[in-house]
Structures are given as structure tokens and as C-alpha cells.
């Protein structure tokens, strides 16, 4: 029996119902779909329209099913430690083993996130996933799969207590998307990752930069809110996470990353 603690003024169970992976299978990722080092990746389109990005490595398995509206279901496992994060515009639900914490996004504050961090304390799955994301970023892995892991790392880092993780990634994407001084947009260097279909990347780049501009404005507003600043900062991060997940869905659907039906 899953033990659930529910906070906020919105019915979390109802709001998160749309995040269920209709017909999702439990197969291991197909190593032929791609891989970097010891990680085998798989990208599949689910029967309900979601796109599932999975990875399998020694002592670490993860799969994140994303949807066009930005809601997602993110499962991470290491041996017998399993974490599931489900999030949409209105609510978040985090489950670890038999314990669960859920709350409405309009009640997102330091106390709520502290409960999530307490639930995740000592999680091998979270530690190993964050370690993988950090390693890929440190070695400047430019594959789309690596970027998918790094994006997931920003989400997990945020709920695991690194409040600035989404903002740092948003700034990095924005900084790398801008042409260097004195160079034109067509002479851009240092993009986050290589792409095989430039039109898909250009659209993604524009959308994610728009999301960062809005987030920057949100952060500036939050800075003026005194004791309410942490609440507004979390709201800024949550909004960026949802938007970036939706744009990631659209990029994968458009790009040359291999897609197969589940």
C-alpha cells in the first residue's frame, strides 16, 4: 500500500491522472537505439502519444515519458531503490518505494519541497542519476541522448534540493544558443548538442530561449518579493521545467532521433 501525504488545495489524484502511461510497457531499452559509454538509450513513441526516453546502465535504469503539454512521468531505479516523479502544470507527485508525497503547484513552497527532499534522502537511484548527468555535462557530451539526461538532471536536482539547477541549465542553453560577439547567427559555435535536422533545432532553440526570457523576468519579479521570494523562485523553476519538457517532446518528435512504436 502506497502511503500518500497530500498538500495544497487542488485534487492531486485528479490532476495527475493524465500523466498515466496508457499501455506503457516494461521492456528494457533497446541497446541498438543508441548508447554512450556504458549507457544504452532507447526512444519510443507510446500508444497514448507520449515519447519515452529510457536509459540502462549498470546499477541504474531510468525512463521518462514526456508529452506535448509538458507533463511527464519520470522513473529512476537503482537495484531495489525506485523513485517516480510525475509533474504537470498543476501538481507534482513523488513516490519512493511505498511512500509518496504530492502537492498542488499553487502550494509549492519551501515546506513542500523539504518534504520531497526528506523522502529522497539517501536515494541511490537519485544519486546515481545525478552523477550520470554531471559526468555527461563535464565531458561535454554533445549527443541528443546526453542532453536528455542533463535536462532530467536539472529537474531531479531541483526537487532534490538544488533550487538553482533549472535556472543554471536555462542560462547555459541561452548562452550557448547566442552567437559569439562579432559572429553571425549562421556562424554559431558551442551548441548544446549536435542535431541532424537543423530546422528542428532552430525551432527548439527559439522556444527554449523564449522560456528563459520569461523565467528571467519571473526571477527579477521574485527578487522583489521579500519573504515570498523562495515561493516565487520555485514557481519560476516549475514553469520552466514544464515548458522545457514540452519543447523537448516536440524536438524529439521532429528530429532524427530514432523513434519506434512501443
Image (spheres, helix red, strand yellow):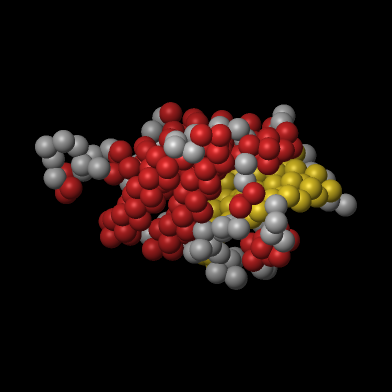
Q: Residue furthest right?
A: 1
Q: Position of residue 260 (x, y in %)?
A: 52, 64
Which quarter shows the C terminus?
bottom right
Q: Is residue 5 left or right of residue 117?
A: right
Along the viewing direction, whichever of 253 and 160 lies nearer the viewer: 160
Residue lying at 43% horizontally and 28% vertically, measured from the top left:
138
Q: Residue at left 49%, top 30%?
A: 135
Place of residue 158 in the rendered image (x, y in percent of width and height, measured from the top left): 56, 38
Task: Report x, y in % for residue 225.
Answer: 49, 38
Q: Quadrant of residue 23?
A: bottom right
Instruction: Inspect this view and state whether residue 31 appears.
Output: no
222 left or right, relative to 171 = right
Residue 13 vs residue 82, the one in the foreground: 13
Q: Is residue 205 left or right of residue 252?
A: left
In the rendered image of this protein, does residue 160 appear above or below residue 75? above
Residue at 44% x, 37% y is 224
Closest to the observer, 230 or 174: 230
Q: Position of residue 175 (x, y in %)?
A: 30, 38
Q: Is residue 6 above or below residue 169?
A: below
Amino acid at each position: 500500500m502506497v502511503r500518500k501525504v497530500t498538500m495544497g488545495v487542488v485534487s492531486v489524484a485528479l490532476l495527475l491522472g493524465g500523466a498515466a502511461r496508457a499501455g506503457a510497457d516494461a521492456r528494457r531499452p533497446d541497446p541498438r537505439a543508441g548508447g554512450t559509454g556504458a549507457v544504452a538509450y532507447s526512444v519510443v513513441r507510446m500508444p497514448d502519444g507520449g515519447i519515452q526516453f529510457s536509459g540502462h546502465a549498470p546499477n541504474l535504469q531510468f525512463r521518462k515519458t514526456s508529452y506535448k503539454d509538458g507533463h511527464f512521468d519520470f522513473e529512476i531505479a537503482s537495484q531495489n531503490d525506485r523513485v517516480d516523479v510525475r509533474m504537470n502544470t498543476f501538481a507534482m507527485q513523488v513516490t519512493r518505494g511505498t511512500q509518496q508525497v504530492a502537492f498542488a503547484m499553487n502550494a509549492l513552497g519551501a515546506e513542500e519541497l523539504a518534504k520531497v527532499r526528506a523522502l529522497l534522502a539517501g536515494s541511490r537511484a537519485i544519486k546515481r542519476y545525478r552523477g550520470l548527468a554531471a559526468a555527461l555535462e563535464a565531458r561535454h557530451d554533445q549527443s541528443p541522448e546526453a542532453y536528455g539526461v542533463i535536462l532530467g538532471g536539472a529537474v531531479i536536482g531541483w526537487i532534490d534540493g538544488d533550487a538553482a539547477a533549472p535556472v543554471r541549465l536555462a542560462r547555459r542553453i541561452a548562452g550557448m544558443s547566442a552567437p559569439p560577439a562579432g559572429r553571425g547567427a549562421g556562424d554559431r559555435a558551442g551548441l548544446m548538442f549536435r542535431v541532424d535536422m537543423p530546422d528542428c533545432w532552430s525551432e527548439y532553440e527559439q522556444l527554449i530561449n523564449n522560456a528563459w526570457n520569461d523565467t528571467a523576468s519571473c526571477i527579477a519579479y521574485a527578487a522583489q518579493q521579500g519573504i515570498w521570494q523562495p515561493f516565487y523562485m520555485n514557481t519560476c523553476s516549475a514553469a520552466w521545467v514544464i515548458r522545457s519538457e514540452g519543447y523537448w517532446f516536440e524536438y524529439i518528435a521532429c528530429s532524427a532521433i530514432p523513434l519506434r512504436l512501443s
